[in-house]
Amino acid sequence: MSFIKNLESECAALPDELRAKVIASLTKWDERLAELQLNISPTPAFNAAIVKVWCSSLFVAESCTRKPELLVDLVNSGALSAIYSETSYAEKLVHKPVETQGELMTKLRDFRRREMVRIAWRDLAGWAELSETLADLSHLADACIQYALDFLYQEACELRGTPLLSDGSAQQIVVLGMGKLGAYELNYSSDIDLIFAYAEDGELPDRKQTSYGEFFTKLCRNLIKVLDEITVDGFVFRTDIRLRPYGDSGPIIMTFDGMENYYQTQAREWERYAMIKVRQVAGDFKVGAQLMAMFRPFVYRRYLDYGAFEELRSLKAQITQELRRKDRMENIKLGPGGIREIEFIGQAFQLIRGGNDKALQTRPILDILQLLGERGLLTQKDADQLSRSYRFLRRVENHIQQYQDQQTHDLPKDRLAQQVLAYSLDYPDWIGFKQDLDKVRAQVHEVFDQVFSLSKQEGATGSSRAGIIWACVADESELTGHLKECGIQDAGGILAAIKDFKNCIAVRRLTAKGAGVLDRLMPQLIEAMRQVDNPDETLLRILGLFEAVAGRNVYLALLSENPGALSQLIKLSSASPWICDYLSQCPVLFDELLDTRKLYEPLKKADLDQQLKVLLAQIEVQDLEQLMVVLRQFKQLNVLRVAAADIMGVIPLMVVSDYLTYIAESIVGHVLERAWLMLTDKHGLPPVPSRFPTGLRYTGNAAIGFAVIGFGKLGGIELGYGSDLDLVFLYDCQDGNAMTDGGKPISCSQFYGRLGLKVRHILDTKMLSGVLYEVDMRLRPNGDSGLLVSHINAYEDYLKNQAWTWELQALVRGRFIAGDAQLKEQYEAIRSRILSLPRDTGRLKKEVREMREKMREALATKDKDKFDLKQSKGGIADIEFIVQFGVLDQAALNVALTTYTDNVRLLEGLQQQGFMSKADAEMLKNAYCTYRDFGHKQVLQGDKAVIAEADVAKMSAQVERIWHEYME
């Protein structure tokens, strides 16, 4: 009794109702130690923990009393106080050789009991963090499965022969762990969900010509028996194989091909969720990697899959209904605010975004919650709260199960069991624990409700009248009456449009699931028409958009699941038909409607560069197709942000063009950088110029001997929504015949020519997602008949000796966009020298005027009372030509006029030079900005840049007056 006497203070701290029973149990164990003459070497930490552990776990107490040597060995060997590595269990099993299957079963059960006592002890004593407990349980399961499989496989091969792969090597099965085992999150008394597969079919060379399928099926049955069968020594792990293809009616094991066919053609939606955490836990890991790669596209779709919300919501509702039927709502795993709700939150975002965001293709839920907080998909507060709640709930779950090693998640109903659980979790009584638990579950369920829009869903299906309109189940007069109540003006016309939409091919082809999404969405849309001033136009625009994207009902699901996103779409569509057209061409952008903070805040140049750098870093150097897809999505996303901010009046005209120009500059710079990497990867580097003697030349686009020059609207920082890019490519190398230094060397002139071709190809190749930019290179020396890439020296010679006046006019707006910083200096010096050459004013004026008249004749609208913003008399082109004439005429007198390329600052410079009066300069600036503002608005309304002449009659007359004064 001496050992028990050492624990008097610990026993005194026990709750009164539990003390006598615990002391009696400890006494019995102490007597067994004496009976078997076993010596234990307890540490102070052991003495401080034993009473609490004994009280908290009948399983530990009974296991140690039945086999006192178990705890003695754990203590004396130091295993109880040690932290295991992930290979510790496998290493311990290696030293336990067995001869027969019966011996294998006994050894594994003894091993399991010993290690489960250790894990429970360390958890209950507070020696182990939750992460250690879950990892230990998972690694223990992995080791037991692999050890049993190795023995049974060897035994089967000796008896029947060895199945082979096509390369002649031995073929072993692949064992997949699902759920918490797959994520290294196994709970204390959890079963293990396994799926078995093998790579190749064939036959053994035995008398029965046993197929590999038969061989591996028997192997799997034996493995399940060894792990799952309850003997006098207990079991190893309860084993469940119902998650396999076809469930209980399917074969125990399938080939890789059979599995691939199943998951591609017959798998149900819930099987995607099950596969999020799949991990190979045993077998042949080399061939298993092929199988794991096959699962990825099944689980993670390439698009944003908002249908996952409804699927998971439905699954959770079924679980809740079943719990309510069985009066088990106090289940901390499946009940409201339980572990499963936290997992569903994480899985929803994984399924929706994991295809695009590879970081979300991870298994542990705590890692996912951290990522969701970092990416702003959950608020940081909610992400942190869910992480804390998950740890709390998992600890409670483990303590419930450690009490009797039973697979239960229900809170105990017995008063003494409740007291034990509260005590094990360091609560003085059940009431205090239950209050904290209820608070945690309420917080979890609140976030779950927000994420899955449960309360919103109940009130967001639209009114009954909107449902009747969409279903078209009443007579026409009633339906039109309901439409008028929803704010519709032309009720008859809109009803016809709704019926046409219901009967269009795209809607008729919807699956049952897609039709269900549309049936939830359309009443919401119809009812929301009361929010806008032009409901008829808005609804017609959105019906056209929905028809265009109906084949990918995931986008309709996004709107159905997010009333806020639907509201943004309605608001933007009401203001501009361009939005609907743009989204129909780029439906991936629907996701942007979710976050109004980002939607109306276009990015500045530095932020664009950083974002694009991160996106492109994930793409292999030679993966041209993926590069072009990502670049297009980047442009589409950022142009949408500019348009949304423009439509809502958040940003002024000048800033709209700035933002659109920033996007183009960022894209061109990164395209050049990636094209350079592609070519140098294949051909090596051109010779390093003498100005870089250290050879440290190729960092980004800093010194690659190549430059992209922008003209027109790009050069003038005046891009519009549909603007193309006027580009010229320049290069510089000392010897065009010098060879690159790679495996496939080419001459420098060839290298830079191919670099230009690659840049152009990336920018203007037509893909399903469109072109990045239409590229116009007719401003290069000799136009379409000239070389695509010009040497910097030849370029200056051409401008000085061969260029037409209109080419010099274009040079006024020529601006370095991307490439070699040294070439930037050279180009700007050349531009300044050329523009500053003295010219005959009369001759220059005549040539500029005649070119403008030719353009006007060919391009201006012939419609009476219409005004072409660019080409009509008194329009944008007249202002631009006045500015270009002024710069070409005056730059010889004041070289500062060559500094800028945008018309507004050039007008300011010409006024300061004395070329024109302040009044005229202000008039032209005002007209220029007004015309461009009209132009942007016309684009956003889906119209051409032609307006009623009367709208700008006074302004155009003033511009005409100034034209006559300066140009005639």
Image (cartoon, grey):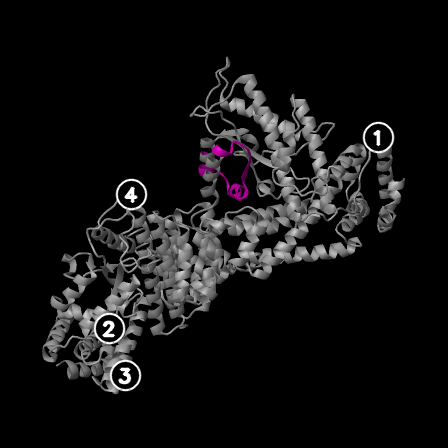
Amino acid found under the numbered disc labelled 1: Leu
Query: Which amino acid type is shown beneath numbered disc 2?
Result: Leu
**What's the residue at 47%, 20% (across, down)?**
203
The magenta stretch is 261-287
Q: Is residue 631 visible?
A: yes
Circle 4 residue:
743
Q: Amino acid at mark 4?
A: Gly
* Circle number at residue 869: 2
Give how far apart the Cα atoms at labels 3 and 1 are. 106 Å
Name the quarter where the C terminus is drawn. Answer: bottom left
**Label 3 packing within 10 angstroms: few (<14), some (14-19), many (20+):** some
Which badge, 4 or 2, is on the more N-terminal residue?
Answer: 4
Disc 4 vs disc 2: which is toward the camera?
A: 4
**Front of the two marks 2 and 1:** 1
Query: Mark 2 against mark 3, which lies toward the viewer?
Result: 3
Residue 406 % position (x, y): 72, 39
Discs 2, 1 touching: Cβ within 8 Å: no
Q: Which residue is mark 1?
A: 36
* Structural crowding at the residue carrying mark 2, measured as other residues with C-alpha within 10 Å and reported as few (<14), some (14–19) or many (≥20): many
- Of labels 2 and 1, earlier in sequence is 1
Q: CA distance from mark 4 to mark 3?
A: 60 Å
Q: Position of residue 598 (x, y in %)?
A: 45, 64
Separation of marks 2 and 3 at Cα, in angstroms: 19 Å
- According to the picture, the residue beneath numbered tag 3 turns out to be 922
Q: Specify which label sits upstream in the sequence, 4 or 1.
A: 1
Rounded to the nearest angstrom, the CA distance separating label 4 from label 2 is 54 Å
Residue beneath the point at 14% across and 64% down: 798
**Rendered position, 12 above or below 172:** below
Q: Nearer the viewer, mark 4 or mark 3?
A: 4
